[in-house]
Image (cartoon, helix red, strand yellow):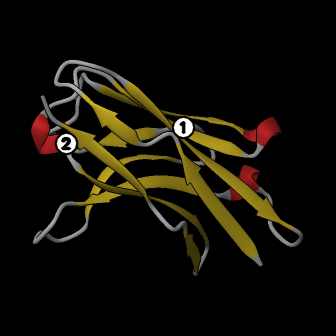
Amino acid sequence: QVQLVESGGGLVQPGESLRLSCAVSSTAFSIYTMTMTWYRQAPGKQRELVAAITEGGRTNYANSVKGRFTISRDNAKSTAYLQMNSLKPEDTAVYYCNAKFLINDWWGQGTQVTVSS
């Protein structure tokens, strides 16, 4: 019903930036009504919330990324973004996009972000 496709991951050095994108496609639901969330999971660790943005534009961030990451959405393009600045090695993880509407939620396949010198 809903497909999420993440892109934009890669290998960068500490201090550099990346922008992740999450493209939403659906014949039944609209991104306009969805809360969009980015999660990440590092090797050997639990998946954790990174940033979220509601359908009304309210945002929430993990303390570890506040001031460095920015979540945004472009409903006309059915896409959510995660701008990541001042990347650190501890940001290395697979980043997943999640879309939620009422009791429904959907996940993307994930995109790898590696921060290493």
Question: Which disc is residue 46 wearing?
Answer: none
Q: What kind of element bears circle 1?
A: strand
In front of the other: label 1 or label 2? 2
Residue drawn at (51%, 68%) of the image: 109
Residue drawn at (20%, 47%) of the image: 92
User: Is residue 30 shown above or below 60?
Assistant: below
Q: Identify which residue, 114 or 85, lies in the foreground.
A: 114
- Where is residue 69 shown, x and y percent of the image? 33, 29
User: Is residue 35 shown above or below 63?
Assistant: below
Q: Taking 1 as reference, is 49 left or right?
A: left
Q: Taking 68 as reference, is 58 left or right?
A: right
Q: Between disc 1 and disc 2, whose residue precedes?
A: 1
Amino acid type of the residue tagged 1 in the rendering: Tyr
Amino acid type of the residue tagged 2 in the rendering: Asp
- Disc 1: which residue: 81
- Disc 2: which residue: 91
On-image quarter of the N terminus = bottom right
On-image quarter of the C terminus = top left
- Where is residue 65 shown, x and y percent of the image? 22, 35
Q: How many badges with numbers are in the image?
A: 2
Q: Identify which residue, 20 or 28, lies in the foreground.
A: 20
Residue drawn at (24%, 22%) of the image: 67
Which quadrant of the view contains residue 59? top left
- Where is residue 54 shown, x and y percent of the image? 54, 48
Q: Taking 32 as reference, is 48 left or right?
A: left
Which quadrant of the view contains residue 2? bottom right
Asked whether the residues under the numbered discs 1 and 2 touch, taking CB atoms below 8 Å apart as contact, a structural biologist would say no
Q: Residues within 10 Å of mark 1 (few under 14, many from 20)?
A: many
Q: Taking 52 as reference, is 1 left or right?
A: right
Which quadrant of the view contains residue 12? top left
Q: Distance of mark 1 from mark 2, alpha carbons?
A: 16 Å
